Image (cartoon, rainbow, N blue to C red):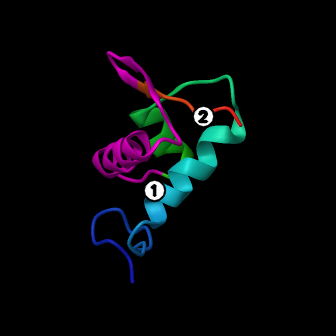
Amino acid sequence: MSHPRSRLPKLRAGQLREQAHAALPADPPRSWSVTELSDQLGGRSAGAVGQALQKLVDTGPAPQVASGPRRYRATPT
C-alpha cells in the first residue's frame, strides 16, 4: 500500500525513525537539516522526518547540533 499523495510505500511504526538513524552515520562529521535528510530518504515528508529525528534526540542517538535551522548528527561511537 502506498501513501495517496507521495506514492511512497507506507512504513510500519518506527520504520522512518530507523531509516533516519541509519542515514545519519553515512557521513559522521556532517550535520543534517530535516529537509536534507528528507531528500536522502527518498522524499519522505519533512514533517514526519522532523518528528522521527526529535524522537532520536529524546532517546540519545542523534543530538540536535543547531536550532536555526534544526540540524542533527549521529552520536559518535
Residue found farthest to the bottom: 1
Q: Residue at x 36, y 48 (%)?
A: 55
Question: What residue does disc 2 label?
Answer: 75
Q: Which mark is residue 66?
A: none
Near-viewer residue (39 or 19) = 19
Q: Which mark is residue 17?
A: 1
Q: Is residue 19 left or right of residue 33?
A: right
Q: Is residue 52 above or below residue 14?
A: above
Q: Nearer the viewer, mark 2 or mark 1?
A: 2
Distance Cα–Cα, label 2 vs label 1: 15 Å
Q: Tell me the kind of residue under disc 1.
A: Arg
Q: Answer few, some or many: residues within 10 Å of disc 2's Cα (few below 14, many 20 plus, some between 14 and 19).
A: some
The part of the image, by quadrant, that contains residue 68 is top left
Is label 1 in a helix, a strand or a loop? Answer: helix
Q: Tell me the kind of residue under disc 2.
A: Thr
Q: Is residue 44 left or right of residue 40?
A: left
Q: Residue at x 42, y 47 (%)?
A: 59
Quarter in which the C terminus is drawn: top right
Near-viewer residue (67 or 46) = 67
Q: Is residue 59 above or below residue 28?
A: below
Q: Position of residue 2 (x, y in %)?
A: 38, 77
* The magenta stretch spans residue 20: no
Q: In the rendered structure, which segment of residues is drawn in magenta?
A: 43-70
